């Protein structure tokens, strides 16, 4: 139990800015195992975002509450995944060889592709999340219950989609310069089972009340499939930035898919 707590806190320290016990460090072995808790981190981020939304929805208006909810999720993660998305936009937008793409993604400076990509991503996330919360009122269930499970599911499933790439593809960089390198070295069935369990549990609970919602998994994992294949084609695998970009894109696809599904059922 003590070891599992250490692994969990390793994941929490690596993927968020939430303070952890001083005894937790970047142990490569624990960092490998921490991938099983990556979707669980989505529970935490989604819960914080939803809590902030509820507070500001009560104080001001839903549209402003959504903005502060997004700000909270960015602060909790330190824009970890948004930064990866920006780097992927820059790398694949401006590079035409594996070496050039990897070099651009490693550069800390953000280019035009990255800046434009992040702005558009946040705009789509803002509009789709706002519409998602408004449409939750038409489900016949408690609006806060539905909104909470949807937000947590979006964060957990998108992280499952991202970490599943680690289970099926090779790490692209040949050096150990990236902090995501230890995650790529090894994994066991415990990481796979843990990731899928924590990734899908909130969504399965929601599907108990509305089974059609399970159809949302199709576009999310199709997106994951095509992104992974695209990364494989150009850089022979993935990097930490690719995982961050996958999480962000799959999160947005989740929101849009739920909205589209509700439109036709």
Image (spheres, rainbow, N blue to C red):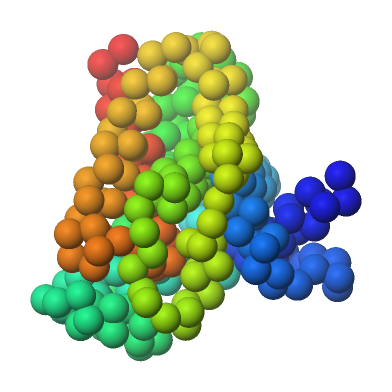
Question: Which residue shows up at 55% across the image and 51% down it?
Answer: 187
Residue 108 coordinates in the image, percent (x, y)? 40, 86
Residue 179 coordinates in the image, percent (x, y)? 53, 75
Q: Is residue 84 at least partly visible in the picture? A: yes
- Closer to the camera in the image, 92 or 175: 175
- Closer to the camera in the image, 123 or 95: 95
Left or right: residue 21 versus residue 127 is right
Outermost left residue = 96
**In the figure, 150 relative to 170: above or below?**
above
Count of labels in the image: 0
**In the figure, 213 relative to 250: above or below?**
above
Question: Which residue shows up at 48% across the image and 79% down it?
Answer: 176
Quadrant of the image containing the C terminus: top left
Residue 228 coordinates in the image, percent (x, y)? 28, 51
Left or right: residue 14 versus residue 242 is right
Question: Which residue shows up at 38% across the image and 64% down it?
Answer: 171
Quadrant of the image containing the N terminus: top right
Residue 93 coordinates in the image, percent (x, y)? 17, 72
- Closer to the camera in the image, 231 or 217: 231
Question: Which residue shows up at 54% across the image and 21% down it?
Answer: 204
**In the figure, 202 relative to 1: above or below?**
above
Q: Is residue 80 at least partly visible in the picture? A: no
Where, by quadrant of the figure, is residue 102 drawn? bottom left
């Amino acid at each position: 139990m003590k070891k599992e707590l250490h692994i969990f806190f390793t994941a929490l320290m690596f993927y968020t800015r939430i303070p952890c016990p001083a005894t937790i460090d970047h142990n490569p072995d624990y960092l490998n195992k921490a991938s099983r808790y990556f979707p669980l981190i989505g529970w935490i981020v989604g819960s914080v975002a939803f809590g902030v939304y509820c507070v500001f929805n009560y104080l001001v208006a839903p549209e402003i509450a959504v903005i502060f909810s997004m700000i909270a999720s960015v602060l909790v993660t330190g824009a970890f995944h948004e930064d990866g998305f920006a780097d992927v936009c820059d790398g694949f937008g401006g590079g035409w060889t594996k070496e050039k793409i990897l070099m651009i993604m490693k550069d800390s400076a953000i280019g035009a592709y990255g800046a434009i990509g992040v702005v558009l991503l946040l705009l789509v996330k803002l509009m789709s999340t706002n519409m998602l919360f408004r449409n939750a009122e038409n489900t016949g269930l408690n609006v806060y219950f539905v909104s909470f499970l949807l937000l947590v599911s979006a964060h957990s499933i998108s992280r499952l989609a991202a970490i599943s790439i680690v289970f099926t593809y090779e790490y692209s960089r040949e050096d150990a310069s990236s902090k995501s390198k230890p995650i790529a070295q090894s994994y066991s069935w415990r990481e796979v089972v843990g990731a899928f369990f924590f990734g899908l549990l909130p969504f399965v609970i929601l599907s108990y009340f509305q089974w059609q919602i399970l159809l949302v998994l199709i576009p999310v994992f199709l997106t994951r499939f095509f992104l992974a294949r695209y990364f494989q084609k150009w850089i022979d695998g993935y990097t930490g930035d690719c995982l961050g970009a996958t999480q962000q894109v799959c999160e947005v696809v989740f929101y849009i898919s739920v909205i589209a599904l509700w439109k036709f059922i």
